[in-house]
Amino acid sequence: MFEKSTYINRRKKLVDGVANGVILILGNNESPMNYKANTFHFRQDSSFLYFFGLDLPGLAGILDVDSGEQIIFGNDVEIEDIIWMGPQTPLQEKASQVGIHKTIPFSKLEEYIKGVISSGRKIHFLPPYRAENMLLVEKLTGITASQQQHYVSVELIKAIVNIRSIKEPAEIEEIRKACATGYQMHVTAMGMAKPGVWEQEIAGTIEGIAVAGGGMVSFPVILSQNGETLHNHDHSNFLKEGKLMLTDAGAETRLHYASDFTRTTPVGGKFTQKQREIYNIVLAANNKATQLTKPGATYLSVHLAACEVIASGLKDMGLMKGDVKEAVASGAHALFFPHGLGHMMGLDVHDMEDLGQIYVGYDDETRPVDQFGTAYLRLGRKLQPGFVITNEPGIYFIPALIDKWKAENIHTSFINFDKVNEYRGFGGIRLEDDILVTENGSQLIGERVPIDPDEVAAIVSK
C-alpha cells in the first residue's frame, strides 16, 4: 500500500466533495471458480482500494460526512483460517496503517446502515457490479438489485471521478512499473510469432510474465491472427506464415495499477506490401493522436483527427474516396475503424468504468456521439494534466460488416467496395500506447514497445 497520509488525504477530498450523509464503499469477496473453496485470484474493488487501501476480502468502508467518523467493517481471522493461511495481522492494526482507527465486525453493518436510514439520513453507494454485492446492498437498504441503478449516488460517483481522474505521482510510478512488465510481455510475444506456434502458447507465456511481475494481467489477453475480431480471446489457432498477430495485453502491479498495450506483428517476420501500407497508416494515426494530446483538448477531437489520418491513408490506397473530412463526419471511416481511440487507465484498465462511462469519459460540455464507431469512444472529454489514457487506433477488414454495408448501400460515395473486397482475410491492425497528459502536452509512459515496422519484423526474425 501507499503511505498512510495518501489514504487519509484521499478520504478527506472525498468527504469534502459530498454535501452530507454517509458514504458506503463495499469491498469485494472471494469469487468461486467451480466450488466455494476453489476461488479465482482475489481482486479488490478499485474504489475501496483507492480510499481504504486494504487488499482483503470481506470488508466495507464507511465515511460519515456529517460527523467525520470513519469505520472499516470486517472480521478478524479465526483459528481455522490461521491453520490454512498462517498467522494474520489483526484487522485493527491493518486499518490503522491506512489511518482508520475504528473497526466493527461485518455482521454489524446491516444494523448500522438501517440506523442511518431510520434517522432520515442519506446513504451514498456506488453501482454494484458483482452479484453478491447487489444482494448485500438489497439486504442493507431494501432496494432490490433490479432497482439499484436508480438509487446509486451520482453525487458520490462524480466526487470519486473528480479525484481518481488526476493521478498522483506515486500512482504514475506504479503505472510505469505496469508498463515495464507490459513491455516484456509484448516483446516476448513478438519473438514467438513464428509459423506453426499455437496462439495459446504465446498467450500463456505472456500471462506468466504478468504474474511474475507481481500482479496479474490487467484484462484477459487478446491475441489472435484473426485480429479483425476486436476482442478476440480465442487462442486456438496455429500461426500461419503471412498472417498478422494482434496482441492486446497488459499487466497489473502488486498495487493493481494497469498497463494496456497493443502491437501487431507479421507472422514469420515479413510484412507484405499491403500489410506494411495499412500498418503505416495506423502508425501515423497513433503518432498524430499523441501529438495532439494535451491539456484543454477534448479526446473526441483527437479521435476525429486520428480518423481523418486513417481515411486519408485509405483514400490514397483507393479503399476510400471523396472528401476526407466529409467521410469522417458521415462515419464512413468506421467500416475500417469501428471503435474509439482510447480510454482512461489507472487502477482499472478502463479506469472507473464500473461507475458509469458517461461520468468518467464525458462531461456537461462534451457528450457522446450517437454514430456507429465514434459511439464506442469511452473518453471524449477535455483532457487535464495527470490523466493517464490509451491511444489505440486501428484498421480492420471485417467480412460481415463489409457485406452488410455493401448490401445496404451504406456510404457508397466514400467507400470503394470492389477494392475493399481485395482485403478479405487481411485481419486487423491496432497499435496502442499508454500516455500521461502533462502540463504542456503529453508523454508516453515508460519505454515505448517496439512499433517501427522494421524493428518489429526484426524481433520476429531473431
Image (cartoon, helix red, strand yellow):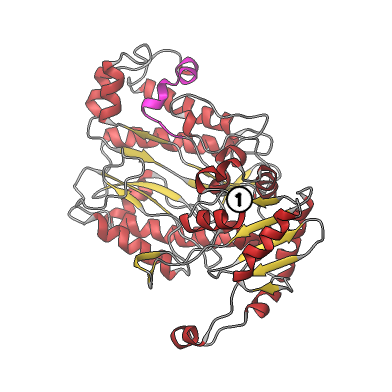
Classify 327 as above or below 430: above
What percent of the width, then of the height, locates residue 163?
69, 50
Q: Residue placed farthest to the front in the image?
A: 118
Q: Is residue 258 visible to us here?
A: no
On the rendered structure, is 168 left or right of 136? right
Q: Residue at x 67, y 59 (%)?
A: 113
Q: Nearer the viewer, residue 234 or 149?
A: 149
Q: Nearer the viewer, residue 382 or 302?
A: 382
Q: Nearer the viewer, residue 47 or 101?
A: 101
Q: Residue at x 44, y 17 (%)?
A: 327
On the rendered structure, is 180 left or right of 355? left
Q: Provide the secondary structure element on which disc 1 rests.
A: loop
Q: For mark 1, what is the residue?
A: 126
Name the image quarter holding residue 221: bottom left
The part of the chain drawn in magenta is 325-339
Classify 126 as above or below 34: above
Classify 315 as above or below 199: above
Q: Residue at x 47, y 24 (%)?
A: 371
On the rendered structure, is 205 left or right of 173? left
Residue 5 on the magenta span: no
Quadrant occupied by the N terminus: bottom right
Kind of residue sitting beneath label 1:
Leu
Q: Residue at x 53, y 84 (%)?
A: 78
Total labels drawn: 1
Classify 397 as above or below 31: above
What percent of the width, then of the height, locates residue 81?
48, 83
What percent of the width, then of the height, locates residue 353?
54, 46
What's the magenta bit mostly, secondary-structure-wise? Answer: helix
Name the image quarter holding residue 453: top left
Quadrant occupied by the C terminus: bottom left
Residue 331 on the magenta span: yes
What percent of the width, then of the height, locates residue 199?
25, 54
